[in-house]
Image: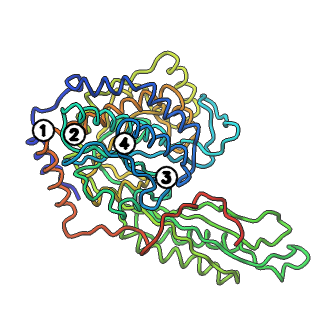
Amino acid sequence: MRFCSLWLCLVALVIGDQDIAFAQKPALNDSISRRGEETWAVAKQIWQFAEPGYQETQSSKLLADTLEKAGFVVKRGVADIPTAFTATYGEGKPVIGIMGEYDALPGLSQQAVPEQLAREGASYGHGCGHHMFGAASMSAAIAIAEQIKAGHLRGTVRFYGCPAEEGGSGKTFMVRAGLFNDCDAALHWHPSSRNSAGDGSCLARAAVKFRFKGTSAHAAGSPDLGRSAVDAVELAAHASELMREHTPDFTRIHHVITAGGGAPNVVPDFGEVFFYLRHPKAEIVKELYPRLLRCAQGAALATDTKLEEVYLGGTMEIMANETLAQVAMNNLKQLNDLKYTPEELEFAARIQSTLSKPLPLDTLTQVFNTSTDVGKGSTDVGDVSWVVPTTGFTTSCYVPGTGAHSWQAVAAGGMSIGKKGMQLAARTMAATTWDLFQQPETLAAAKAEFAKRLEGRKYDPLLLPGQKAPLDYRNSPVAQ
């Protein structure tokens, strides 16, 4: 549903000629620049930690400790999640939330070099740049806190330490715990291979692991005594492929086999397959999930094995807010100063030689409007956007044309190309937050738009009643 003409007019009336170049906010700029090396050190340390979702013990502690030292009141282990936290500075209204993430992805160990080369002793890597996400958001929050302390702003800034975005739905449980209930607006950003702003949406997603228990036997000597759990895994996967043809447009169903036996001469008694089910609308995901479950149930029946359904929860699609998006867009356009050094150009050329669809490097100077896009990924920011007006943006932290969740993204995120994009994000986040503090009429318009978009609908998360955060979802499966 779009409200372009209505809300762009509202934004024009609200903001009018109030577009303020960042040069008129020198204290914010100075604050972020002054801490630039410290912020990059935090980001690079989290890049080195490369911790799985819900296991980001060192990463979350580093961010929380840094914010605490800056005067924030930190609450750790919120929403019954050990690596989730909030850090608050100031008091009263407005309350502006700034989100930060810090989980890494499996199978993406990579050095900060322009060739595929794993880091010794590491199996995870920051292929989505969450090390920069958390650090830049932290820097912006500290810059705003300094302005509150100096008396130039009145209100509250709150940093949300959000774990396990990659499939663990961390923010969904934080929303359910009421942590965003008093927010007037929530902001996020994300590393990318291009600069963009404008509120489109994304795919809602459900995640589930199907575990099958069979009976082991000698695969050649007594196969009749065995019941293969891996046969069940393969049959469930095949059934999902057949199901795919008969689903609504834009449905995505994908899986990985996370446990499939150890030796071909032993009938495996345990198998596990990990599924994502996505669609642009959460209600369609809810309708399709029972069909995916029946694929697994049928596989268990056919193979005489027992099924355990491990539902991990899910995430909503993003509810756009063009009022807030326009503020972020204005700041990103004004602040974008990205330019590569000769050394970075050489790094970029080597990376682009490995890409199937590299983009021109002059896209660094552009800011793309994504207000009509429906992203093909999923994010638990979607759940936040259903309870508080929310917007985000991206900055170019990877070589143009680089896809996320790739070794090339991990490499760029560990060197100066990533650092420059991260600093641009921190400045844009701080400037946008500043504007929301200074322009109560913009917040009012954002809330009116939020209420209009929500009209007739309610937030109904893709969680089971009483479901706990799946703190062990990244653990290696073992036979039960």
Q: In which quarter of the view is residue 267 placed?
A: bottom right
* Cα distance in 3D space between marks 3 and 2: 31 Å
Instruction: Specify whether 76 is left or right of 440.
Output: right
Label 1: few (<14), some or many (≥20) within 10 Å? some
Work out whether mark 2 precedes mark 4 in sequence or the reverse, and give the earlier one.
4
Work out whether mark 2 precedes mark 1 in sequence or the reverse, and give the earlier one.
1
| Amino acid under disc 2 | Val
The label number, if any, that marks residue 274 in the structure image: none
Q: Look at mark 2 in the image and give the residue it sits on.
A: 327
Work out whether mark 4 precedes mark 3 in sequence or the reverse, and give the earlier one.
3
Q: Is residue 266 visible?
A: yes
The residue nearer to you, when weighing 79 against 23, is: 79
How far from the left and from the top, in percent, is residue 312? 51, 66
How far from the left and from the top, in percent, is residue 273? 62, 66
Residue pictured at 20% horizontal, 41% vertical:
436
- Is label 4 in contact with label 1 (beta carbons under 8 Å)? no
* Cα distance in 3D space between marks 4 and 3: 20 Å
Secondary structure under the numbered disc 1 in the rendered image: helix
* Cα distance in 3D space between marks 2 and 4: 13 Å
Q: Look at mark 4 in the image and give the residue it sits on.
A: 189
Secondary structure under the numbered disc 3 in the rendered image: loop
| Amino acid under disc 3 | Thr
Q: Look at mark 3 in the image and give the residue it sits on.
A: 83
Secondary structure under the numbered disc 2 in the rendered image: helix
